[in-house]
Image (cartoon, rainbow, N blue to C red):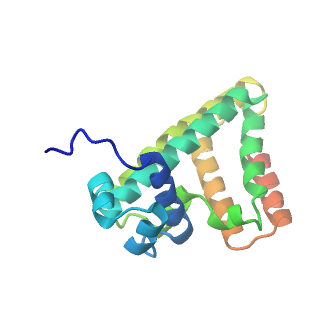
């Protein structure tokens, strides 16, 4: 009898979140199959049947994280009092993670970019595909801030968006390296001044 019609005996989103947390804390290379099986509470056969190889599982986790990040940031932009306030809020929320467990974890996308660089073209493409929608949000925020008079009109929104990506990645790395909140907040102030 075929198994195609049988319902899954686990919640795919829940087990994917468990795997994502392991990759997020340990990195791809340092994560063993045993780590994943224990966190996901799956047998090896269930993991392979449902998610494929370790790398395919990692790609699924990156996409899930990227979608979650984009959804949250899009909501924040929509609800922000201004385009510049959105940028301030994003940077302030990162600064607030300094010397906390959340800050020590960093950002899964930034961590993975640092770990892989361009070593694996497939993972590099997955990361780039997830960063692109975030760039569009930054561009939208900059253009809104220009309309509202908070960022000069002659500034190139695309270059500003790239600058914000670099700034966010730098802040996350600073915090992971153990920077205190005061240092991070000072850096955030300089980043915001540069936008004006």
Q: Is residue 77 left or right of residue 21?
A: right
Q: Position of residue 56 (x, y in %)?
A: 33, 57
Q: Position of residue 190 (x, y in %)?
A: 79, 54
Q: Is residue 45 left or right of residue 130?
A: left
Q: How many marks?
A: 0
Q: Nearer the viewer, residue 65 or 9?
A: 9
Q: Looking at the image, which residue is at 42% across and 45% down?
A: 129
Q: Looking at the image, which residue is at 36% across and 67% down?
A: 119
Residue 127 in view = no
Residue 46 in view = yes
Image height of 172 relative to 150, above or below: below
Q: Is residue 42 left or right of residue 147?
A: left
Give the image quarter of residue 106: bottom right
Residue at the outermost right position: 182
Q: Nearer the viewer, residue 47 or 32?
A: 47
Q: Looking at the image, which residue is at 38% across and 54% down?
A: 59
Q: Nearer the viewer, residue 65 or 32?
A: 32
The quadrant in which the C terminus is found is top right
Q: Position of residue 130 (x, y in %)?
A: 46, 46
Residue at the outermost left position: 1
Give the image quarter of residue 172: bottom right
Q: Looking at the image, which residue is at 76% across and 70% down?
A: 179
The quadrant in which the N terminus is found is top left
Residue at the outermost front position: 1
Q: Position of residue 28 (x, y in %)?
A: 44, 68
Residue at the outermost top position: 147
Image height of 52 relative to 22, above or below: above
């Amino acid at each position: 009898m075929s198994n195609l019609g049988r319902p899954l005996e686990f919640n795919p989103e829940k087990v994917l979140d468990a795997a994502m947390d392991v990759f997020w804390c340990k990195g791809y290379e340092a994560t063993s199959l045993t780590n994943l099986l224990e966190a996901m509470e799956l047998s090896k056969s269930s993991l392979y049947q449902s998610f494929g190889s370790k790398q395919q599982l990692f790609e699924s986790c990156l996409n899930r994280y990227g979608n979650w990040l984009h959804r949250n940031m899009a909501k924040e932009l929509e609800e922000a009092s201004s385009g510049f306030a959105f940028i301030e809020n994003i940077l302030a929320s990162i600064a607030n993670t300094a010397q906390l467990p959340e800050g020590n974890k960093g950002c899964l996308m930034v961590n993975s970019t640092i770990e892989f660089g361009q070593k694996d073209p497939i993972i590099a493409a997955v990361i780039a595909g997830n960063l692109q929608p975030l760039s569009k949000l930054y561009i939208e925020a900059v253009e809104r801030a220009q309309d509202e008079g908070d960022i000069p009109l002659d500034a190139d929104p695309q270059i500003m968006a790239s600058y914000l990506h670099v700034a966010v990645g730098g802040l996350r790395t600073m915090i992971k390296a153990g920077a205190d909140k005061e240092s991070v907040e000072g850096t955030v102030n300089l980043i915001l001044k540069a936008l004006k």
